[in-house]
Amino acid sequence: MSSPWPLVGRAEEFGLVCHALTSAGASGGVVVAGAAGVGKSRLAREASAHVVGSRRVCHQLFASESARSVPLGVFAEFAAHFGADPLRRIDEVITALTAARPTLSTVVSIDDAHLLDMQSALVVQQLFLRKAATVLLTLRSGEPAPDAITALYKDHGVPRLELQPLGPDDVASLLESALDGPVESASAQRLWRYTRGNVLYLRQLLEEELARGRLVSRYGVWVWVGHPEVSPTLGELIDANMGRHPRKVLDVLDIVATSEQVDMPVLLALVNPDAVSDAEARGLITVDSAADVVRPAHPLFVEARRRHLTTVRRRDLSRRLATSIGELCPPSPQRTVQRATLLADSHDPVDAVLFTEAANAALQLLDPALAVEFAERAMACGGGTAAQLTYALTLITFGNPVRGEAVIAELLDFAQTDVERAYITMLRAANLGWNLGSPDRADQTLSATDEVSAAAGLTSSYRALRASFHASRGRPDAALELLDGAEPHDAHPGAAMFAIWALVAAHGDLGDLTRLDAAARRGYQLAAAQPEASHMRFGLGSIHLDGLLTLGALRDASAVATELQDAARDIAPSQAMTALVCGMADLGAGNLASAQRKLRESLAIARDAHGSAELSGFWLITALAMAGDYDGACRQQEQALWTSSEEFVLWDPHRGLAHAWTEAAGGQVTIARETALAAADLARHQHRPAKEALCLQTATQFGDTSTADRLAELAIVVGGPRASAAAAHATALAADDGSGLLAASKAYEAFGDRVAAADAAAQSATVFRARGAKGSALTATSVAQLIAADTGADTIALRALAAPIALTPRQLEIISLAAAGLSNKEIAERLVMSVRSVEGHILRACQRTGIHSRRGLIALVTERTSDGDTTELT
Amino acid sequence: MTQRQREREEALDRLPLPYATALRLRDSGVDDAVIARCVGVDVDGLPTLVSIAKAKLAAAGFVE
């Protein structure tokens, strides 16, 4: 961690203080007030250092409790040898401080001026009134200060700057500076929330969490994986800042510390109303009048207070709170979870029914850790099948599908009725088909209980699931046929959501933008209305977004990603998914740096979350490769997980394109084209025309000229702007039409695919250049370079534009492979040609460019300095 | 809401909450003593806080 921390978020405050200290027309002083730890002293120090740099004399003094007991104690170094007459001593201190310098050119800075004794305060006042010096004072807000000090800003016009805690953005910037690396967004937000932007708390907390290994770097992103415990050091800091309070106020704080958020009626049932008012007036609690709840004013106050609670007291408070909540408040998922949490802590006799209800409530609230805890407690006290089912559902919902499958298989063995068996089978099939990526096995599981599903009223639910498995197998027509175009209305909410996933995926594959969006909207409404389907909105989001991006509705995709981000709770699995979808949206729009960051964040959080980690991994490969980071993309490929079975092909086109982009980043043009074309062929074979169009577009971006006819056919059947733009692009490329390629670039830019726009413009420039149309070539080059600079793209087409004019694409490709370290023999194998052909291309490249060595050619293409070596063409 | 008002709102959203709150309450004509209480500062510090808020608003991209 860097030390000292940079001064972040204080530019305006620093400017104001420095102006007050140095400006000719300034008032002669400034007071910086604020809470303990907010950064007053640091700001004053920085301003003082700045003043010294402008040739003023600055005396930095520090008031303290101990110096307060001695008259003129803070000025001891200036007052030690003077007489007993206080007024004379004050004059002599002022003279010693200012030493006959021009008025106001001396700055006297006093930290914690609220601790000054009366005589010292009088010195400060006289320095100001006599214009003998400029005063810079820091004061702790809420602490009484000597009248002589308060009069400065109340009566004499000295500006009082109330320094505020840092906002979330400034805390995030500060963390990134201190940790020298990006910090995962939700972690930064949590750290801000715990410390409320108080820099002193933040620093202390960061040091402790680093030391305890709860702040870790994953995939180049810092993630906070812990819940903070208040160390003795931090606790003392907080205790000191909280100050002393009467017992009745501490009782209020104890209750709030036990439950964090307390309904006002519950609190008033347990303590005297005057005590609540007193606690609020002391700034220890905040009252949300609209919701009628009480919360701690600062999260760390709660943590610090908990340290002081004895076990007996905590259990007693927990029990009383749980009882009052049950008696006084209308039931809700939040209150169910609250009561269960309190009762778990109270060690009262257990209630399996309450814990099962609380587990389901925690699931609805997307709190997997609590859901698992409550489900385990419910099972431990004999909760039966209901508790075990909830436990299994929690496991499979939040990232442990393998363990979930084991629990479900066990449940099936002990199922007592056909209805129970059918329901458990449905859950098992969903887990097998989607989380474990085995739709065939999932289908077989459903088939085994087809007969009982009808008796259990689950026929529609089974059909919904089967349709989703068709979609995951890349069979959109079969999915739509089974559903007859709409999700069944009598299906279990979870199954209905799977049907919607199927509809969205199928319409996305077939290129029906309107139906895709309509089905997705119905899905989000279902998630909002049905708790059982609530958590599935994020999986829906990834499929919805994929469809929008594939068809070219990129602005809609960004809007959907933003909506999902707003809906996400502060829970790792949903954060991982929203980071994924935001990364996907950024990638589609060509915001490559932002896409890489968000996808890394998703990976960093999702280390323990199945599914999203796999998707984030291969999207990150594409984002890295599009930016030309071949090594990074290869490293990511080595780490990428893919646990789904072969029949789960939903994401295969993108996995194929990730490989193609990586090969392109490595200069392997021919292979990249072949990979993209192979992905297109596969999509065509599966009858997924929208995905096929995307793959063919990519091949076109790589310079393949065989895609025009097929893209023209697809443009008729696939909705959205992408297919027609790609068709125009391919036609222009095949015809060597520079103007057509530039028009295609504009078409891509119009709907937001900026990387494709850059590629088409670069190809246009290459065509114009080859024809000697210098003006048009310059125009197209400018377009390409502008977009490339904005997106960070570094693609085959852009590199070809930057390459020496004399080289052919094949020569460029061979030299790029040589630059990657391949020998001529390896290049020949890679490009399926003879070694002699490779050598021939290199020789001709040398003749064209006037360069005499292989190394020189590599240097020319990669812009490294040539060492003038004239040997070794192999 | 005009485009300029929208831009101002967006810039206010980027400010730390006490500054945004102070400016919004000022816009609504709320008394300084009430604003100071809402924001949690001494009333003598409010003029400087508003001045800083305006400077931060300008830094966030909106110059008044």
Image: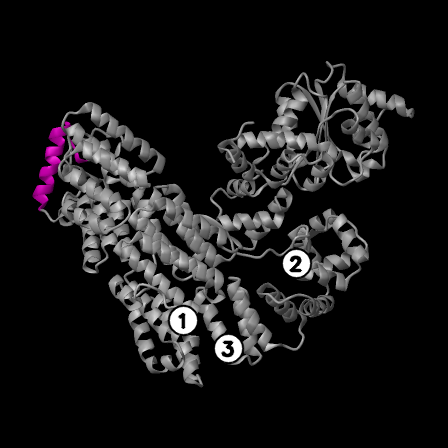
Measured Cα–Cα span from mark 3 to mark 1: 22 Å
Q: Position of residue A547 (x, y in %)?
A: 32, 53
Residue hosting label 3: A386
Callout 1–callout 2 Cβ contact below 8 Å: no
Q: Amino acid at mark 3?
A: Ala
Please name which of the two marks, 3 or 1, marks the residue nearer to the observer. 1
Residue hosting label 2: A260
Whether residue A174 is visible: yes
Whether residue A636 is visible: no
Residue at figure coordinates x 85%, y 29% from the top left: A119
Residue hosting label 1: A490
**Do the residues at discs 3 and 2 belong to one chain?**
yes
Residue span colored magenta: A834-854
Residue A747 got which mark? none
Disc 2, SS: loop
Give the mark nearest the N terminus, 1 or 2: 2
- Camera-nearest residue between A719 and A742: A719
